[in-house]
Image (cartoon, rainbow, N blue to C red):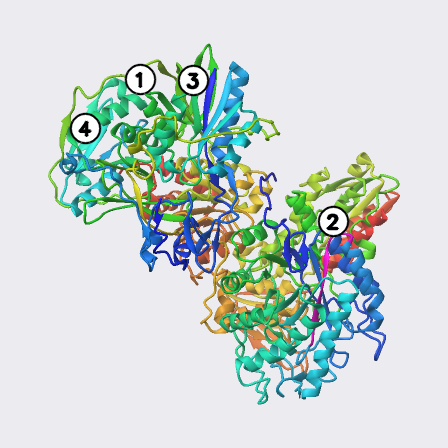
Amino acid sequence: MNIIVCVKQVPDTNEVKIDQKTNNLVREGVPGILNPYDQNCVELALRLREQAGGKVTVVSMGPGQAKEAVQYCLDMGADEGILLSDRAVGGSDTLATGYILSRLIGSRDYDLVMCGNEAIDGCTGQVGPIIAGNLGLKQFTYVTDAKIKDGKLLVQREVGKDLELYEASLPAVICVQKDINQPRKPVCSGREVTVINAEGLGLDADRIGNHGSPTRVVKIRMSDARVKSFFTVDDTLPWEERIRFIINGGIESKGKVDLWRGSAGELAGRIAGCPEVSRFLEDVR
Amino acid sequence: MITINEKKCSGCGICKSACLFGAIEVRDKKAVVSEACTGCGACAEKCPCKAIEIPETNVGKAEDFDTYKDVWAVLEMDLSRGQLKKVSLELLSEARRLADLSGQKVGAVLLADEMPKGFEENLSYVGCDYAHVVLDEQLKRYHTLDFSNCVVRMVEKYKPAVVLFPATENGRDLAPRVSCALQTGLTADCTALDMDEKGNLVQIRPTYGGNIMASIITPNHRPQLASVRPNVLSIEQAGQKDKPMIFLESGMFTHEEKDCRLLKVSGRENVFQDVAESSVVVVAGYGVGSKENFEKVKRLALKMNAAIGATRKVVDEGWAPFEVQVGQTGKTIAPDVYISFGVSGALQHTIGMQKAKFKIAVNNDPAAAIFKMCDAAILGDAGEIADALLQEIS
Amino acid sequence: METKMEFKHLLSPFRIKGVTFKNRFIFLPHHTGYAVDEGYLANGLFSDRNVRHYVERAKGGAAAVTVSQNVDPDSQMSFRYVLGYEQRNRDNFKRLAEEAHQYDCKVITQLNHGGHTTLLNPPQLLVAPTQMNEPYCHFNTKELEPDDMKRIKEYYINSAAWQKELGWDAVELKIAHDGLLRTFVSPYFNRRTDEYGGSFENRMRYPLEIIAGIREAVGEDYPIGIRLCVDEFTWYGYSLEYGMQVAKALEAGGVDYISTDAGTFSSWYMQIPPSPLPLGWAVYESAELKKNIDIPVFAFGRINDPVQAETILAENNADFIGMCRQLLCDPETPNKTMEGRLDDIRHCIGCNEACVGVDGIYVECIQNPGVGREKHFGIGTLEEAKEKKQVMVVGAGVAGLKTAELAARRGHRVEVYEKSAKIGGQILLAEKVPYRNEMEEIYRYLRIQLQQLGVPVHCNVEVDEEMIGKLDPQVLVIATGSVPLAPEYEGLQESSLTVMTAKEAMENVNRIGNRVLLFDDIGSWQGGGVADYCMALGARVTVLCSAASVGVDIESGQAYLLTKRLYENGADIIANHTIRKFDGDKVVIENTYNHACKELEGFDTVIIAGQSRSENQLYKRFRGLRPHVYSVGDCVAPRGVEQAIFEAEVLARKI
């Protein structure tokens, strides 16, 4: 069975630091890693190969440095690794990326196409389905397990609170969730990554790069949603206020608070009745 | 990617500081851009020499570009209740707001096996003008090819300018498939939407692991697709509006999903939502008193689709894993709603949740420190109240 | 506790000039009081005890230990404060460098000058840039003459150069609570009219001259750091904004790192912040510094946990984590972090009882008897028992748990029996007191260790002779604690008021009314702490103290903050009085000096924090039953946590 796994090298977004002076991201020294979802995906692919025999080919698209991620997959046990690296494909959005990868995949034999459900930098989860759309294949996202049985694919999706189990004929595209297995550690394989450029893939120039990207970023700013794990003290407060603020843990103390009292049922009703809470309750009231 | 006109570039490096992605370096007194460039143009704005060009796409607009009109939302069903999911109304409400900004109408798309309870009333409440409904037994459960082909056919026929999808699992499965078929742009997980003067949908979302907020548009393609997560938008009652027109579509749906069958659907056990990501977090402290009571609180959290959190002592007891520990030696959280049971309010814990927007604390110690920093202070037995609340919302 | 946490920042090395620190744990400088005082011109001697104290933290895995020293023999903070330039310290200074280096731990000199601050009472002479007293101290100072300043500068430079020769790795100057350099920098204390005062540049001149002199002596590659007070937290003092200016000027003057600090002797509770100050409260200071300077910054301030430390570093709020009390309490914190044994880390609870204490003579720790006694109780001194015995411990309070832990570590087969439903003894009540909830760490740590060691702890079991007979242990340890003495006062039985001991009050919260009279008779937390708790319940409290203030036996920083809380929450404090008798609904109190009596009324509850007595009935009953029967902790004599743990340590090593 021929399995093609699409992977991506991403910046380790947990390592991203903010340069305190410029309030920009410090990109230098942020290590590039194999997208964690892809690690679990490659592991699943290797297990399928163990189960059904065949070959696992890893493909990726990215700058030269992305070779490391593909090498990692080879060292996990993939049979072949291909990196498409070409400035012409730079600046592609998800539609363009999905198209390019589908051309790369389409140029080879495959029974099953696998990828991580999303990448931790963009977190769109779009490229897998777009590859499937370009190849005209059935797709399964949010996959938490897959097996081959009698030449058919048995695939499990986790959707909300449900576990769905499907049986489908190949070929298909599956997009794999993270943390579903323990990816094996890479061991020097001696296999090398093949780096190719876009020539020979027959890419339509109108569908790649900036030209081929319907979406464009028009503005960016630093997100202030990052919750800091410490409080800051207003330096202009008088010294005793500063100390009091610190002792309160930077939390505004509400002084005397009205305690709600009553029977459990009454109190529960009051809690559920708070507008801040009720808006999250499942009922569409 | 942007291009740098070397003749004009003075090597001042202002572009380098402006770039949030670190995609520009200055080498030999000239700015050099790397593949990390997203083309956002933040540098071009700041360049004093006007040496930076943002590439124009030479893909022209399609001829029928201006005929696309109206803001649609694709609705999703809550199968267990036979009614629309709340996120559907959130999307329609937002669609109403965007449509009003641009003088358009709001349409809904529903694929289902039967009409949901309260359909007309719900749509009326949020000011939806019309709905295209496809009913078929085979549309009870979501299937990629069936749903996407159907949606694509309706879009091609009716030409909405904007289509919003819920960023639920199935919504995120569907939307990119539709974008590929229509060869148009899609932005996933938007945290905010807007309309600009040109009638472009402005799609705002976090990227780069949440560190950057990006504003994105789809200037030359129609329709513009975007998905939004549940509980991000709010449901607003629309002003006086007529009842929505419901169009029952036929001929839009053909069962195409071949060689694929659903064998089984079962419930998931022990789903611990990510405590740092969830909008509602229910935390159990040691004051709940026993593992049984802790389990009650956990069941409540599951029912509310909230994350369950725990204080250090609870984790020590082995009732909850370290991953859900909230506090200085665990995670810092800032949910929309924080409900605690039996948490005393020691600073090591409260510092980890002080930015929660609405805080409710249940404790039987009237002197519990947590009461001084919450919005609703409830004196009572944790186990009893967790039980009662579970009943209340079931 | 399983965790996938990796401490990528905390355990990564960092280089400052020619020195590579193997991780980010820095043992912050502190006065230990271990230096030897042999009299005039023969004090501040760096002792064997000093060496072992620092080597212990090197063994435990810290990247560097910082040693506090006085530079000026004529102006000492204390005769047990190490003298940096004392030639007699040569051998032990060298020895410390050699032994610490064996663990790849660097040794940093911290050079101080008390200036207008001292630990002596009264001091011989205090000096300052301008003649003024430090507000906490009533002794005025000598205004330094240029010759004095020159001489002091020489002391700084010579100490730094000499210790570099002896093999020490870096030098740090204190511009913080030990006051001289800080007073020069301070606009309030420095009113000089020569070139060392009158403007910011002038005020910085003296410290910068000293730094330049040291730089010349030690060379470019040797790190020079500053322990800088960035916020004095006093009515007269400077705050972070000014502290930032100072930091920038120091950076421009060639300094290689800034170690953040806060507080002064007038705000001494901010210097060694006790438990009311939250964990990691001062991170905002190092974060702010990171925004304004390029040189590395050390964070400080009740950072006692590697997860917390890693977050601080990961968010780029500091480059190093300064820990003092945490490494006193558990010197092996860095090694345990490296080994992923987070559960084995014993956390500092910020009680300050033994490390600052009432008289601050020797630094010790209530949880770790090894502090100051590294030779006897330090890392590697716990020997395996030659003969493994069956040990039965009765009572799961602090003394019982600690004895069980160490006995089990030595290889004995231990079982613990507890009469009540929970372990922890009196700490279960102590932890309810406001700002004392961290006390639970004391038994939490022990409980986790007992779990790891496979020691069964049986609750809800009352041990009797039959059980002992059946279980047949060779060693019986009784740790049954103490209970308060029932108050005995004239008219008590007939009083209409609710009268309880502190323990009864904490166990029966519903019986605490709205108007409480709390009698602090023994000056400990049972008095002031329970008063605090009553206020948290919403009661109006009057504290009656037999001594001159509330909590005389509580560490002074804690007592200060406690008293402040009492006053700010509307409590009344009546000092120097005891309860004479009860009279219906009134309480008659008596002045301890002149015995004048007064009647107090309007209370509904009276809580008495008085003496306790040992619960030693079981010890007396079981004494002959086994070859070895011991008692430990409060059931020997009611004391505190420090004594219980020390006693348990000694006993467990004896068994």
Cα–Cα gap, marks 1 and 3 = 23 Å
Horizontally, residue C398 falls left or right of residue A244, namely right
Q: Which mark is residue B156?
A: 4
Cα–Cα gap, marks 3 and 2 = 67 Å
Q: Mark 2 points at which residue?
A: C402
Residue C635 in view (yes/no): no
Quarter of the rendering containing residue C455: top right
Q: Share a chain, discs 4 and 1?
A: yes
Using the image, name the chain to which the residue with label 1 belongs.
B
Q: Does the residue at mark 1 contact the one at mark 3 (Cβ under 8 Å)?
A: no
Is residue A238 a member of the stretch shown in magenta? no
Q: Name the residue under label 1.
A: B257
Quarter of the rendering containing residue C432: bottom right
Q: Residue B175 carries which label?
A: none
What's the residue type where badge 4 is placed?
A: Glu
Cα–Cα gap, marks 4 and 3 = 33 Å
What's the residue type where badge 3 is placed?
A: Asp
Of the image marks 4 and 1, the number of the one nearer the N terminus: 4
Is residue C105 a member of the stretch shown in magenta? yes
